[in-house]
Image: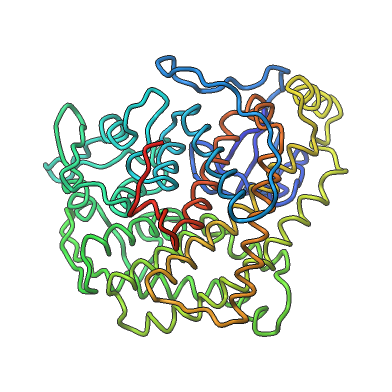
Amino acid sequence: MNKSRIGQFSFDHDRLGQSRRQFLLGALAAGAVGLTACGDPQTVTVTSTPTPTPSPTPTPAAMPSLPPLPAKTYPADYKNALLAMDEMVNHYAKVFDSPSALIHAVRAFGKNFKRADGSNTVEHLCGRYAEEQPVNGKRFVRFTRFNVEVHDNSFLKTFLEASVSPDQSITAGGNKYTLRDVGEHAKSLFRFDPNNLTRYEKDYVHEHLPWTLIAFSTLMPGGKGSWDNAYGEKIDLMDVVDKTFADFESKCQPLKAAMDSNGGVSRDLHEVIKVYSCYGGHSLYGFLACVKNGYTDRGMTERMNEMMKLSVYRLVKEAENIETEYDERKPMPMSPNPQEEAMMLQMLQRVGVSKNELIDMLKLRGVVKLTGHLLEAINFARLNNIFKPTPEQQKLIQAGEQKLFASTVQLRALNLEGLRSFNAKEFNDNVIALGHASRALKLLTPDNPDKNPKAI
C-alpha cells in the first residue's frame, strides 16, 4: 500500500472508501514518502491521534544550516518561473540532503551539483547508497531501491543521461565498483516477462520499468539489445519495449477518444492514467528514450508520434481538472472527526499555514508535476527529432508552459518554510516535481543540464 503523511495523518494512495474514517480530499498530487517518488494520494486516512508538534526537518547534523527561503512573488513568465524552480530545488535539495532530493537536483542542474557542505552530490550518492545483492552464488551491485532510489535503476539512468563517467567509483559492502559495473549488473538482475507483465512484480511496469528502459537503451543503443540475466533467462529489449508500450497505448485509449472528440479529460479518464507514475510522464519519456536510442522496430516511431499528440492535448486539459479537484475540497473538512480536525488545524496554525494554503501547495505541485513531466518528454522528443509539433500543437504547448509558469511562481509565493515545518517529508516531494520541470524548460536551451552541468 502506498501512503504519505501530512502531520500525523496518512494519505492512502490505493484504497478509496474502505473505512468510515477515510475522507476524499481530491486527487492530492503528492508523492508517497518512502515508497514512491511520484505517487498520487486519493484519500485521507486518520491512522493515529495527532499531536500539535510539527514534523522535524530531516537535516543531517553534519550539514551546515541554511537560512530560510522567504516567500517571493515573480511574474509568470519563462525566465521567472525557471528562476523560481531553481531557487526552490537548489535550496531544499541542500536542506533535506535526502537521496530523492539530491538526485532530482542532479536532474535540474547536472552532475556538478553540490551539497550544502560543498561536496559533489554524485560522489556522495555513489559512495553511500549502493548495495550488493547475491544471486546464484554471485554478487551484484545496485543502488538500494527502498527508501533510496525508489524506482529501479533511477539513479543509474539519471547518471547516464547526465554524462557521469562509466568509471565513476561506487562503494557497496565495503567493495569498490564502477558505474559501468552497475549498468552491467542491472542487466543481470533484470527479470521481466513481456508476455506476462506482472509475473515477477505486480507494479513493475508502472513504477520501475521507465527508468530501466532509459538505462538499458542508453547502454545498448541500436535497437538490438539482448542478453541472458543472472537467472538464466533470455531478455530481448525490443520485445519488452513493444509489449509494454502496447499496454500503455491500451490504457491511454479513453484519453485518446476524448482527444479525438475534442472533449475534456474527465475525472474518470484522469484516474486511468494515474496508474502510471507521475501521470504517465515517466513511461512516456522512457519509450521516447528507446526510440531515440534506435528501438524503432514494430512501428515504434509512428506509434510514439500518436502518443505525443495525446500528450500535448493533455497538457492543458488535465491540468484544469487537477485544479478543479483541489479547489472543490477547500470548504470541506480534512477529517470526519471534529476533534481530529481541530488538532490538525492547530498544527497548521502553529507553523503559520492555513488549510487552504496547504491544499494550494498540493494543487500547484500537482499541476507542476503533470505539466513538468509532460513537457520534459515533449521537449526531449523535439530535441532528438522524434516529434515535430504542428502550429496548432505548438499553441497547446505554449498554453501548457504558461500553466506551468503560473503554478510555479504561485508555489514560490507560498509560506514554504511553514509548509516544510508542518511536514518535511511531504514537502520534499516539491523538489521532485520541480526538478523535472526545471530540466524540461532547459532541454532546448544552452543550459541543458546534461551537456552544461552547473556547480550550484
In this view, the residue in front, 261 or 173, is 261
Q: Position of residue 174 (x, y in %)?
A: 17, 26
What residue is shown at x 64% (from left), y 51% (from top)? 366
Asked if 18 appears above or below 70 in the picture, the reply is below
Q: Position of residue 78 (x, y in %)?
A: 60, 56
What residue is shown at x 18% (from left), y 40% (from top)? 134
Asked if 220 appears above or below 109 in the picture, the reply is below
In this view, the residue in front, 214 or 166, is 166
Q: Is residue 31 left or right of residue 326?
A: left
What residue is shown at x 11% (from left), y 42% (from top)? 137
Asked if 43 appears above or below 306 in the picture, the reply is above
What residue is shown at x 40% (from left), y 59% (from top)? 210
Quarter occupied by residue 140: top left
In this view, the residue in front, 7 or 228, is 7
Quarter occupied by residue 347: top right
Q: How is the image coloured?
A: rainbow
Q: Position of residue 336 (x, y in %)?
A: 83, 36
